[in-house]
Amino acid sequence: MTGTAPADDPALDDEPAGSRFAPLVDVACVRRDGDGARPGHDILADEVPVALVFNGISHAVMMATPQDLEDFALGFSLTERIIERPGDLRDCRRTDFDKGIELALTIPARRFALLKERRRSLVGRTGCGLCGVESLDEAVRPAAALPDGPAIAAAVVARALAAMAPRQVLNQDSHAVHAAAWAGLDGEIALIREDVGRHNAVDKLIGALARAGSDPAAGFLVATSRCSYEIVQKAASAGIRVIAAVSAPTAYAVRLADGANMTLIAFARGARHSLYSHPERITG
C-alpha cells in the first residue's frame, strides 16, 4: 500500500542518489463517510531509524525524517556536547540498510575518549530516558547565560511567522511535520529544516547554521511546536538568544530560558504572542 513520493517532489532534492528512504510516502487508504466507503490515498511524512555511530561505536538510534541528515548529525553532536565545535566532526558517511540509516561519524580521539567514558558510566545505572545521559544532574544541566544581543521588533517576529508556511515543503503535503527556522533581524527566513520530531528539526537547523558559519546573534529561532526544555537547552548551547514558538512552553522551559538570558516567545500566531522571559529584547 505504500510507495515513495514522486521523483520530482521538491522534498527529495537533497536526498543522496540511491537512497532507500523518502521523507514523504504515498499511502493508500479507505475513506468512509455517510455515503459509504471509497478508495483514497494520503501523502504521509515518514520516520526512519537513524543510527549515530561515532568512530565505529553506536551511540544512539533516533527516529527521524530521512532528509538533511548531515545537518542532523552535526547539530546533534553539538547540542549533546559530543563535540565542541563544527570542525570536530571530521566525516559523516551515510549508509542505507533495509531497516534504517547509519551515519558513520568521525570525531577527534580526545572527544571520542570522553564519549567512551560517558558510555562506561552508564553501565549498572538506571537510565533516565534521555539519549546518552547517565544521571538526572546531566539531564537537567543549566544553560550558561548568553550575552544581551540586539533588540528585535515585534513586527519582525510576525513577519517570520507569516513566512513559515510557504517554506514548509514536507508539511504542505503531510500536515505532520515540525519545522525549525532561522530568521534574520529583518524577519526574513534564511534557513528552515523539517522533521517529524521537533527536537530533530532544531538539531538539523543548528547543524545547518554551524555549517553555514552563521552568527547566532544575527537572528532568532522560530519553531512550529510547543517549546519544551530540550528545545531551549539546544538553542542555548548554540548561542541563540530568542525563540518564537507557535504553541505553549513548559514551565521548565521558561525557567531555563530566564536563567540563560534568553527571550522565550510562545503562542506566536500572526501579530499576537506571549513573552515569558526577558521581554525587554522585543520592541514595538
Image (cartoon, rainbow, N blue to C red):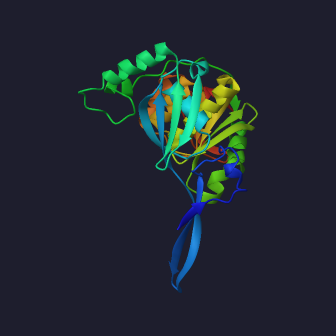
Left or right: where 159 falls relative to 34? right
Q: Nearer the viewer, residue 96 or 43?
A: 96
Q: Is residue 26 above or below residue 82?
A: below
Residue at the spot 51% in from the left edge and 80% down from the top edge: 33
Q: Position of residue 161 (x, y in %)?
A: 67, 44
Residue 217 in which image quadrant: top right
Residue at the spot 47% in from the left edge and 13% down from the top edge: 110
Q: Position of residue 225 (x, y in %)?
A: 54, 45
Total number of numbered discs in the rendering: 0
Q: Position of residue 149 (x, y in %)?
A: 65, 20
As drawn, the residue found furthest toward the bottom would be 35
Left or right: where 270 falls relative to 81? right
Q: Which of the image's four quarters has the C terminus?
A: top right
Residue at the spot 65% in from the left edge and 32% down from the top edge: 208
Q: Position of residue 8 (x, y in %)?
A: 73, 56
Q: Nearer the viewer, residue 53 or 74?
A: 53
Q: Is residue 18 above or below residue 88?
A: below
Q: Let me know if residue 7 appears in the view.
A: yes
Q: Is residue 96 above or below residue 70?
A: below
Left or right: where 32 falls relative to 125? right
Residue 25 in which image quadrant: bottom right
As drawn, the residue found furthest toward the top would be 110
Q: Let me know if residue 275 appears in the view.
A: no
